[in-house]
Image (spheres, rainbow, N blue to C red):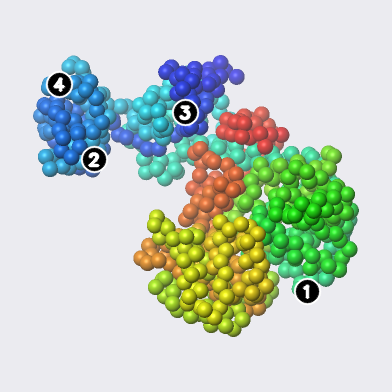
Amino acid sequence: MHQQENKLHAPLTTLKGIGPALAGKLERLDVYRVEDLLFMLPLRYEDRTRLTVLGAARPGQRCLVSGEVLLAETVYRGRRSLLVRIADGTGQLTLRFFYFSRQQQSQFQQGVRVSCYGDVRAVAGGLEMIHPEYRLLKPEHDAVTSDALTPVYSVTEGVQQVRLRNLVAQALEIMRSTAPSELLPDDVLADLHLPTLTAALLYLHQPPPDADLQSIEAGKHPCQLRLSFEELLAHYMSLRNLRLLARREAAVALRGGREEMQAFIRSLPYQLTGAQDRVCTEIAADLSQPHPMMRLVQGDVGSGKTVVAAVACIKAIACGKQAAIMAPTELLAEQHWHNFNLWFHDFDLQLAWLAGSQRSKDRKESLAAIATGAADLIIGTHALFQDGVDFHGLALIIIDEQHRFGVQQRMALRDKGMSGKLHPHQLVMTATPIPRTLAMAAYADLDTSIIDELPPGRQPVTTVALPDKRREEVIARVRKACSGGQQAYWVCPLIEESAVLNYEAAEARHNLLVEALPELRIGLVHGRMKSLARDKVMRAFKEGKIDVLVATTVIEVGVDVPAASLMIIENAERMGLSQLHQLRGRVGRGREQSHCVLLYRQPLGQLARSRLAVLRDSNDGFLVAQRDLELRGPGELLGTRQTGLPQYRIANLLRDAELMPAVKRVAERLQRSEKQKAALIITRWLGDAGRYGKV
């Protein structure tokens, strides 16, 4: 590698003016090496390429001006401020400073020339700029205009804009001497009409005066697309390496169990849908391979993912191995426990339960059954993979509600479940439908199956949106439905009344409904309750001992209650479409026609109106997810905080989704025939974060 390029990879302290203290502050901006400065793109640009005469300055304009100081004085009108009046023969302007030192004040002597950049605003005495950037000019010098637009970067405490510009300029100077390696093949750049890396970086840090700022603000300029493409490529290849790794690793080839699977499917009180049959076939083919399956099953709420998981478990157990199912909450794990006990009742199988709230004696019994192999199927929460749990022959891990677990957790589970040198097969399931381009970027380490068909007889939930002033009508509707033996959910975003967020609070709504519906049994669950207390209420609701369950969004992923046919959601306009769709999926699980009422607070903006219309008009989770992605972005849809979804420096999964097919194509080519370039791209963008995807 060129010595000069090594300078780009050098620590920040090799730059002029950076000591350990400043380097530490820059780390808050994710800047560790000289090269990182190049990939920290400006937030916006300022035009200092032209000087505006004071007579032409207009309120609302942001511009560069210069003039001679006529007067500088400290005034005390309301608050202490320094006023500096300047003129250039065409007009006058006042500079106003609220924070200033005595030395600063003494600089503005009458007759001194000064250039300033800032926002012009109208005041009673004419025009002024508050705290402009300024420079004192030597008598023989004119105001200095820039050759390029001036970048404005994201700053952090202790790092001023001017200093940051100086550091980036130093990094650009190093880059000009010897360009960083161009890692994308020439024909790829030509096909996609993209510039080289060096050209893109120079343009974005120092755009010419006639740059298309509208295109840059939209993130659609070819120079931005060049960087976004390489960053998406790095993330995609890192995840794809996980899949390649899995294919090199050994797993038990589960080749038997065909008869047992068919016997189980025949024992069900209903027929599997075509989509369920197709996905079962895909899973069975994966499980019969001598390398670990890594498959994501997407299916809308109520599409029957759990039965597909049960078929996979039967195959593993029939081959003499253990299977484990992990759910994100104890309540959901308990629902799986009841379902699997019911389904496997006539089969000679041993089930074990493992969760955080278990009594010590029961836990010991479960651990012993797991360790000896007496337990065929183990169901529980993340407690399944804590220290002290030793599996006898775990061959299949099923993770429910995949979006609650990240790549790192998937890797940890795979390692924990190893038996000697054999890795377990992994099946992850989600009821959050993910648009194809987003799934391609976020789950490139997984093969994907989609259950895109609802079981026959399942009636779509009818959805209406009503202003909250019609709440009394909704309460009357709840009274009528529950008097007829049905049950209802009433969901509120907050637990208590909040002065900040004007949401309906669950506790207040519970009190109101208890008063309004004295003949009904009203329950309450929320996230601050202890899990045992919450589970107790949910169990009572499932058993029909509660008519109306007032809840926060903790029930988004919840238990099946076939008699629940009415879902009321307060402040629906404040919630994401996918979350609303998940909540709506809590009803419609029985034979009764189910209804969802979206209560909203007026006035309703155009965006909120169009969002609620999507839910009113469609029960298709994939369509809802696509609209949610367009409206709120990928972090919200996938739950970034929970997933460990990679944080992009430049790329945007929503904005740049159209690049993904080309990213996939180029990734496959590089990883097949130019492995060194592929590795360098991953290192450039992910550094050590790419460790999970190294082959």
In the rendered image, residue 5, in percent from the top left (x then y), is placed at 54, 20
In the rendered image, residue 338, in percent from the top left (x then y), is placed at 75, 65
Q: For mark 3, what is the residue?
A: 26
Of labels 2 and 4, the one closer to you: 4
- What label sits on residue 61 in the rendered view? 2
Q: Above or below — where is 75 with respect to 366?
A: above
Name the image quarter holding the C terminus.
Answer: top right
Q: For mark 1, what is the residue?
A: 269
Give neighbour class at mark 2: few <14, some 14-19, many 20+ (Cα, 10 Å).
few
Say if residue 519 shows up in the picture: yes
First in residue order: circle 3 vs circle 2: 3
Please tell me which residue is depicted at 15% across the width and 21% down the height of the picture.
109
Q: For mark 4, what is the residue?
A: 109
Relative placement, left or right, of 493 versus 130 is: right
- Measured in 3D between alpha carbons, the distance from the residue under mark 3 to the one under mark 2, in whole angstroms, is 32 Å
Describe the element under mark 4 as helix, strand or loop.
loop
Please tell me which residue is depicted at 45% across the width and 79% down the height of the picture.
473
First in residue order: circle 3 vs circle 1: 3
- Measured in 3D between alpha carbons, the distance from the residue under mark 1 to the one under mark 2, in whole angstroms, is 72 Å
Q: Report the amino acid beneath label 2.
A: Gln
In the rendered image, residue 654, in percent from the top left (x then y), is placed at 51, 49
Describe the element under mark 2 as helix, strand or loop.
loop
Relative placement, left or right, of 404 versus 598 is: right
Q: Above or below — where is 3 with respect to 689?
A: above
First in residue order: circle 1 vs circle 2: 2
Give neighbour class at mark 4: few <14, some 14-19, many 20+ (Cα, 10 Å).
some
- Measured in 3D between alpha carbons, the distance from the residue under mark 3 to the one under mark 1, in whole angstroms, is 62 Å
Name the image quarter holding the N terminus.
Answer: top right
Q: Report the amino acid beneath label 3.
A: Leu
* Residue 621 falls in image quadrant: bottom right
